[in-house]
Amino acid sequence: MRRAAALSALAVAMLVPASAPAGPLDRDYSAYSRNIIPSGQYGDVPIPEGATTQAEMYDALTPRFDQVTSADLLTDFKYAGFGVGPDGPGVAEKGLPRTGVRIVRDRFNVPHVRAKTYDAGIWAAGWIAAKDRGLLLQQARYNSRVAVIDAPGLDALGLISGLKTFVPSAQTETAVRRQTQALKKAGRQGRKVLHDIDVYVSGINAYLKKSKSPNKPWTRSDVYALEALKGQFVGQGGGGEARRTQFFSSLEARLGPDDALEVFNDLRQHDDPEQPASIPATFPYAPIPTKRAGNVLIDPGSFQRKSALASGRTVARVKQQASNVLMVGGGRSKTGRPLMVGGPQIGYFYPGLTYEIDMHAPGLVWRGATSAPFPGYMLIGRGPDFAVTLTSAGGDIIDQYAETLCDGSDTKYMYKGVCREMGLFNAGTLDGETVSFHQTVHGPVVGYATVDGVKVAISSKRSSRGRDALDLLLYRDLSTGAVKSPKTFFKAAAKSPQTFNSFYVDRKNIAVYTSGRLPVRPSSVDPGLLTDGSGNFEWSRFLGPKAHPQQNNPKTGQIVNWNNNIARGFGAADDEWMRAGAVSRVDLLNKNLARLATGGKHTLATVTAAMNAGATQDIRAIDTVPLLVRLLGGSAPPSPQAKQMLDLMVAWAKNGAGGSRLDVDLDGKIDDPGAAVMDAAWPKIADAFMAPVLGANLAEFATLESRHSLSQYTGWYQYFDKDIRTLLGDNVAGKLNKRYCGAGVRATCQSDVWGAIQAAFIEMAELQGPDPSAWRGDAEAERIGFTPGLLTKTIRWTNRPSGIQQVISFKGHR
């Protein structure tokens, strides 16, 4: 028996990669390393057994709210150290058509790569991409090309998730191939990326050949297209000037220019002095000019979008704003070492947009989430002695221009005094329908409008267009040992043209850098309005690396971000009005961290608990309800039921520690009636307090920024907070220009808000009866499914990272 057991143990050991370090880059310096990717590693149809395992672990953490223990981290996250570790036994893949490569799969199907050469490791990553994400690769490779060319009205991820079929033209293929030149111009490092892409593609094609796939072999262009998809999905901001200029013009027509500008500035919250910025340092960017000379105001209601599809239909942009990270420095950690819990929110898909690799090759040592655009590089994860993650920064890298038309034509425009013909881009077909669009010197024509009744074209210019592949320079540095400190991390992050907040942690440091090819506009151009396309107001340069928001070990002892503005002074993009307000959903993470600390110190469990509680809390319960109580104090409610509704919301908030939208008993209803009360009352409260100033513009504004969203990134709670604190006589920095609720009269405001609550009662009583304590929100409707529906598994609503979430700390340094 003992001999049999020994032989069995030896057999298992032979299936597991050698654990002996191959060198300083291969040694694991982590003190604790776990992660979770809810979409899992599998990507096949029919759905393999075990495909939902990580989703179930992810779902198990949600109802724990703020009661997360160290034991929970072991059950709800999986091992993320180097090697198979406790997730064995490992099983080696057989039949690899390349020598010097060994791939071992653990019980979660995560591949652990051991390669004898750098190129063999890159090749293995291609093989894994094709094997684990073959369905996604084929569906994405051509659809993603619309992101490269910025085809108006088409969103690459929308095409992919909608199972559409884009067939690119020769003109599109030529545009995609130009990314090669961008990499060559980047010098030696760019040429290394090109080499890696070629080796990676050979790994993909080796698997296609081995599996006798009918799909065409992969090329560099497929990688470029997917990199552009990443940028369009989460790596760009701006480009909403036409609709917002139209809104401003509508305000101006009703209120006059001075009052309209005051309201417009209130609503866009460009750089609020009270904003909960992630770092204390200030980084000035994109200020609002005191006098405008380079903008064009289009007529109210005149903007008409233009689609690249002949029918005029559009495929809406899929946008995610839910990535978060919580990092505390060693001084606030019980171990004396920095702690990080964080990851990107990229939605829930099967096959997943991300998947995991544990990579070990000479000069290539990492473990974490990667994706098809990354040729052997990690996207989010860890090296031997550091970890990285990111959130979308939404930096303003897209501007829209008003082009003056000439010669009585819709396709001719004036630029630098010359009447020019627009270029026609024949992009291909989408499900058989022609895709084409016109372009100016600035970029694709995305619509038309009028200025004083005269027609103009609206074009869109993206600073990262044609340079998407340069993003790979950052991730090559992260994966090949070039990043060794915050300083080298900043240098690497600065290489990306896409706009992200990148976060770094090692045994001593926490740090952040905001990347992006950020244009510097003329001082007379308001970045939130349409730019005059005459050629007199072009970008002058791009923000230098040292001027980007960045900080290492801030005095606050923490860096916390939930897509809010990283630093004060850094103006929010024109389509990001909720990024720099006085309050934000990141308040939930900050408040949870403060209340869950013991003696001011944290463990990885308490940091995870702060995140997990915030993932199901409603920001209106935490930030808005206390203000409602103060506002309505001393006033008479219109009915006992209205008073009961307020009391229920107060009980739900539980002094800042509650406000959850959980359905713990899984009966399909949100447990606390306060959530149902708020959902019913808030739209009416929002309209009631904004209407005195917005008036007839209320509905149009709601199309720009919703009253509330389940993600809580957007919501009029931000305006309510600042306006009501001012009304109550609080010390408010950067007060709004206008008084909204009750036009600044407290009694009127109280009456309007009570009236809104009463109206909500009347409406809800018809639906759920006259007792507000019996009302319940529909938790079943909020459950999360996996797009596009191949995987039928659903999980509880939670607002936490989905691409990968790491729980990690380091004890050593190479």
Image (cartoon, helix red, strand yellow):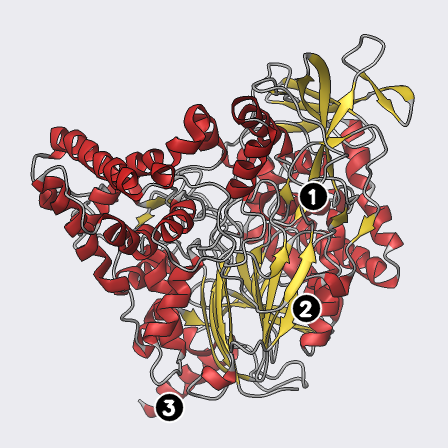
CB within 8 Å, label 3 to label 2: no
7 relative position to 568: left or right? left
Between 681 and 393, the one nearer to me in the picture: 681
Q: Which residue is mark 1?
A: 290
The crowding category of the residue bearing disc 1, from other C-alpha atoms within 10 Å (few below 14, some 14 to 19, many at least 20), is few
Amino acid type, label 2 = Leu
Q: Is residue 536 left or right of residue 810?
A: right
Amino acid type assigned to the residue bearing label 1 in the image: Thr
Residue at label 3? Answer: 3
Quadrant in which residue 203 is drawn:
bottom right
Mark 1 or mark 3: whose residue is earlier in sequence: 3
State the residue lying farthest toward the top: 408
227 versus 299 height, above or below: below
Q: CA distance from mark 1 to mark 3?
A: 84 Å
- Name the amino acid, label 3: Arg
Give the quarter of the figure containing the C terminus: bottom right
